[in-house]
Image (cartoon, rainbow, N blue to C red):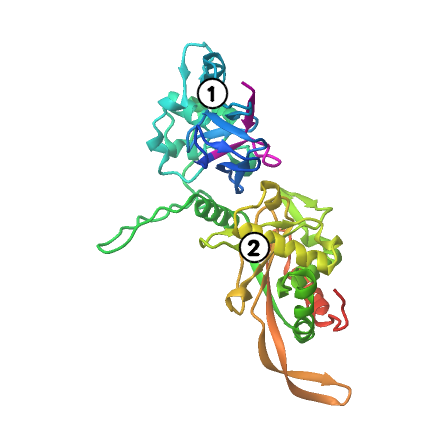
C-alpha cells in the first residue's frame, strides 16, 4: 500500500495552529485531486484543505474541534491502485498517540497532563484563545480563568504563551495585586433574558470581531474628521464605461475601487498616516496595503487586503476588489490575504448610509469611511459667477488614532483625497 500524508499546511506568517471545524470527507471515502477534505479555522480566517492526490481516505488523526499545530499529519490517503490495504498498527500508534495530545511535564518529570484531562467547561466563559498546552498547565496549577485573564501575554495579539504562564507561576507567591483603577478592564454589567427572548451564542468569527473592536477602542483614542466631496465626474464616467467594461472584462466596475485607488495615492502624499505604533516607536510602513471591509452573507465582517495598492493601476484595483470580495463571500480567502494591511477602507454607502465613525483596524492608525452618493443642490463657482446645480455629493470620514495623528494631519489627508476625487478626469481610460 502506498500512503500519502495530509498535513496541516502553513497558513500564513505567525499562524502556528488551526482548529478543525468539520471533516468534509470520512474514512473510506474516495478522493479526487483537489477535493476538499476538511474545513479549518484560525484566529484570522476560515479555510479548506484540498487533497493534492487521488485515493482513498483511510485514517483521520483528529476530531472536529481539535487544535492542530502547523505541519502535523492530520490524515492518511491510500494512493495505491487497489486502495484496500489497512494502515499498520505501528504507523497508527506512531502518529496518533504523539500528535493528537499536547503534553506538559513539570520540572521533576513527575506529572504528565494531556488536554483530555483538562476540564474544558471552565474555558466556556472566556472569549480569549488559550492553546491546549496553556490550558493543561493552568489545570495542573489550579489557575482560575479570572487569574489567567489577568496575565499579560507576549504572543501574537497579546496571546498568552507557555513562557508567560510559567513566568507568572514562578513569581505567583510574590505578586502584590494593585488596587483597582480606571485603567483595568471594564466588566460588563450582568444582563438577564426574559420570557420570549431568544438567546444565541456568538459564532467564532463574531467573537473575534467583538474582541478586536473592544481592544481597538481601548488601545487607541479615536477621533473622526469629516469632509464632503463632489464626485459628479466619477459618477458620470462610471455610467459611461460600465457596460463596455463588463462586456470586455466580464466584471462589474463599482465605486469602491475608484475610492481605494484615490485613498492609496493620498497616502503617498501623507505617509504619516500609513504607520503603526509600537509603544512610543512609530513604524513608517514602506508598503501601502489597503484593507477593504467586506460584509459576509452571515452578517459577519472580514477585511481582505490589496497589497501594494498604490502601485496598481485603476483596472488592477478593480480586478483585485472583485476577486477578493467574491472569494470572501464564498469563504475561499487564504490566510495571508487578510494580513499585512496598513490602512483600511469601509464603504457605508453600500447600505445607503450617509456616513459613519468606523473603528480602527489595529495595528493601523486610521480607517476611511465612505458614505452614500446622493444628488444634492450645490453652489458651483465659475468665472462668470456662482450658480446652483445638481451634483453628486458624498461624505468621507476618517477615524484616526490621536496618539500619533492630530486633527491637522487628518484634515490634510481628507482634503487631498477630496482633491483627487473631484479632479477625476472624465477622459480616464480603463
Quarter the N terminus occupies: top right
- In the rendered structure, which segment of residues is drawn in magenta? 1-19
Image quadrant in which you'd find residue 333: top right
The image shows residue 378, relative to residue 354, as above or below, that is: below
Judge whether residue 408 can be spotted in this image. no
Task: Please state which of residues 238 and 164 is positioned toward the viewer in this rendering.
Answer: 238
Residue situated furthest left in the rendering: 195
Could you say whether the residue bearing mark 2 is in a helix, strand or loop? loop
Image quadrant in which you'd find residue 344: bottom right
Place of residue 143 in the rendered image (x, y in percent of width and height, measured from the top left): 38, 26
Residue situated furthest front in the rendering: 82
Q: Which comes before the other along the chain, label 2 or label 1?
A: 1
Place of residue 92 in the rendered image (x, y in percent of width and height, measured from the top left): 47, 17
Task: Please state which of residues 213 and 428 is positioned toward the viewer in this rendering.
Answer: 428
The image shows residue 324, relative to residue 356, as above or below, that is: above
Specify whether 273 is left or right of 95: right
Place of residue 121 in the rendered image (x, y in percent of width and height, measured from the top left): 33, 32
Q: Residue at x 21, y 54 (%)?
A: 195
Could you say whether the residue bearing mark 1 is in a helix, strand or loop? helix
State yes or no: residue 8 in magenta.
Answer: yes
Residue named by callout 2: 293
The mark found on residue 170 in the picture is: 1
Q: Residue at x 68, y 60 (%)?
A: 249
Q: Residue at x 61, y 45 (%)?
A: 337
Place of residue 422 in the rendered image (x, y in percent of width and height, measured from the top left): 70, 72
Q: CA distance from mark 2 to mark 1?
A: 43 Å
Q: Residue at x 58, y 80 (%)?
A: 376
Amino acid at each position: 500500500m502506498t500512503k500519502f500524508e495530509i498535513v496541516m499546511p502553513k497558513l500564513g506568517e505567525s499562524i502556528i495552529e488551526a482548529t478543525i471545524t468539520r471533516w468534509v470527507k470520512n474514512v473510506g471515502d474516495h478522493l479526487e485531486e483537489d477535493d476538499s477534505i476538511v474545513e479549518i479555522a484560525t484566529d484570522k480566517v476560515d479555510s479548506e484543505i484540498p487533497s493534492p492526490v487521488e485515493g482513498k481516505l483511510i485514517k483521520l488523526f483528529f476530531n472536529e474541534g481539535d487544535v492542530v499545530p502547523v505541519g502535523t499529519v492530520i490524515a492518511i490517503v491510500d494512493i495505491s491502485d487497489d486502495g484496500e490495504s489497512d494502515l499498520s498498527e505501528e504507523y497508527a500508534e506512531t502518529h496518533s498517540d504523539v500528535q493528537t495530545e499536547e503534553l506538559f511535564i513539570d520540572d521533576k518529570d513527575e506529572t504528565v497532563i494531556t488536554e483530555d484531562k483538562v476540564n474544558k467547561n471552565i474555558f466556556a466563559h472566556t472569549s480569549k484563545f488559550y492553546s491546549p498546552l496553556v490550558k493543561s498547565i493552568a489545570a495542573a496549577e489550579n489557575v482560575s480563568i479570572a487569574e489567567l485573564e489577568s496575565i499579560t501575554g507576549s504572543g501574537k495579539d497579546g496571546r498568552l504563551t507557555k513562557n508567560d504562564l510559567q513566568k507568572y507561576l514562578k513569581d505567583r507567591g510574590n505578586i502584590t495585586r494593585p488596587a483597582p483603577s480606571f485603567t483595568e478592564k471594564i466588566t460588563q454589567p450582568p444582563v438577564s433574558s426574559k420570557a420570549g427572548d431568544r438567546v444565541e451564542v456568538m459564532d467564532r468569527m463574531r467573537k473575534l470581531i467583538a474582541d478586536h473592536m473592544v481592544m481597538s477602542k481601548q488601545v487607541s483614542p479615536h477621533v473622526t474628521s469629516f469632509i464632503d466631496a463632489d464626485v459628479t465626474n466619477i459618477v458620470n464616467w462610471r455610467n459611461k464605461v460600465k457596460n463596455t467594461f463588463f462586456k470586455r472584462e466580464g466584471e462589474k466596475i463599482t465605486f469602491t475601487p475608484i475610492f481605494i485607488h484615490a485613498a492609496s495615492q493620498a497616502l503617498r502624499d501623507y505617509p504619516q498616516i500609513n504607520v503603526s505604533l509600537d509603544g512610543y516607536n512609530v513604524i513608517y510602513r514602506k508598503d501601502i496595503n489597503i484593507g477593504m471591509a467586506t460584509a459576509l452573507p452571515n452578517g459577519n465582517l472580514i477585511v481582505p487586503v490589496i497589497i501594494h495598492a498604490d502601485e496598481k493601476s485603476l483596472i488592477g484595483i478593480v480586478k483585485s476588489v472583485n476577486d477578493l470580495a467574491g472569494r470572501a463571500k464564498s469563504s475561499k480567502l487564504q490566510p495571508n490575504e487578510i494580513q499585512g494591511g496598513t490602512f483600511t477602507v469601509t464603504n457605508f454607502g453600500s447600505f445607503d448610509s450617509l456616513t459613519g465613525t468606523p473603528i480602527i483596524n489595529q495595528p493601523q492608525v486610521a480607517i476611511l469611511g465612505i458614505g452614500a452618493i446622493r444628488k444634492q443642490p450645490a453652489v458651483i463657482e465659475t468665472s462668470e459667477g456662482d450658480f446652483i446645480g445638481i451634483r453628486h455629493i458624498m461624505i468621507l470620514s476618517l477615524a484616526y488614532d490621536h496618539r500619533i495623528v492630530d486633527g491637522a494631519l487628518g484634515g490634510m489627508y481628507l482634503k487631498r483625497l477630496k482633491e483627487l476625487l473631484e479632479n477625476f478626469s472624465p477622459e480616464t481610460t480603463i
